[in-house]
Amino acid sequence: PEVINGRTHKATVVDLSPWVEYEFRVVASNSVGIGEPSRPSALLKTKAAVPVVAPTNINGGGGSRSELVITWEPVSEELQNGEGFGYIIMFRPLGSTTWTKAVVASVESSKYVYRNESITPLSPFEVKVGVYNNEGEGTLSSISIVYSGEDEPQMAPAGASALSVSAAAVEVSWLPIPWNRHTGRVLGYEVRGW
């Protein structure tokens, strides 16, 4: 802090965070040194302001067929800048010009799920997440690409064959299912025998 002239009896403190409680002390100094601080002032809360920090780590994906799951890192309380804090979620199919907007009014929220039967499995969406409070809408995050939920595989593996390798073991092989943009990646296979 700046050193204030000894004949001055008030000062303006700047660069404080909005909607935060502060208390203040005053310390007198001279050429000999610094004295004891005053007792703390009463708590004083700064006025609310529009939030300026956007959520980070915008991600998502997964979910069920016909779902777009969007996740983010919640904004900490000291950066919410006022009451009535919530999140604004904006998304659109990649290549589209029209944004869909949703509001999540819960401070603790870190996830939004959009369900619509017209969503094609594993489709890319442009996503932005912003913030608001009673003072107005704040900053939006930069755009992230999030994919809608996958569908189950639509075909069985081909070329299954079995080879006896011992009295108690059989080696089973098959051709992998090719990756399909509409159903997604195959995470595993189940081998059944009878």
Image (cartoon, grey):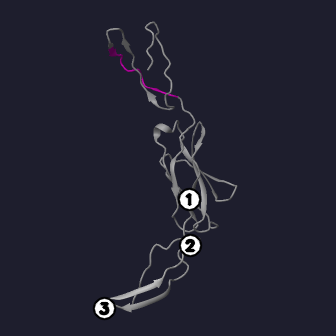
Q: Which mark is residue 166?
A: 3
**Circle 2: residue type:** Thr
Within the magenta stretch, is there residue 49?
no
- Kindly indicate whether the residue at mark 1 contacts the one at mark 2 (C-beta within 8 angstroms): no
User: How far apart are labels 3 and 2 at the CA level?
Assistant: 37 Å
The x and y percentages for residue 47 are 53, 29
Furthest-right residue in this view: 97
Question: Would you say residue 44 is visible in this rendering?
Answer: yes
Which quadrant of the structure image shows residue 146? bottom right
Question: Would you say residue 88 is visible in this rendering?
Answer: no
Establish if 123 lies above or below 23: below
Within 10 angstroms of label 3, few (less than 14), some, or many (20 or more) residues?
few
Q: What residue lies at 56% left-to-right and 79% top-to-bottom? A: 154
Q: Which mark is residue 146?
A: 1
Furthest-top residue in this view: 7
What is the magenta range? 35-46
Within the magenta stretch, is there residue 39?
yes
**Circle 1: residue type:** Val
N-terminal label among 2 and 1: 1
Which quadrant of the structure image shows residue 181? bottom right
Which dot, 1 or 3, sits closer to the camera? 3
Q: What residue lies at 62% left-to-right and 68% top-to-bottom? A: 120
Establish if 44 lies above or below 172: above
Establish if 83 lies above or below 192: above
The x and y percentages for residue 139 are 58, 42
Q: Which mark is residue 39?
A: none
Which residue is the site of mark 2?
A: 183
User: How far apart are labels 2 and 1 at the CA level?
Assistant: 15 Å
Q: Secondary structure at mark 1?
A: strand
Establish if 173 lies above or below 123: below
The x and y percentages for residue 10 are 48, 13
Q: What residue lies at 68% left-to-right and 58% top-to-bottom? A: 96
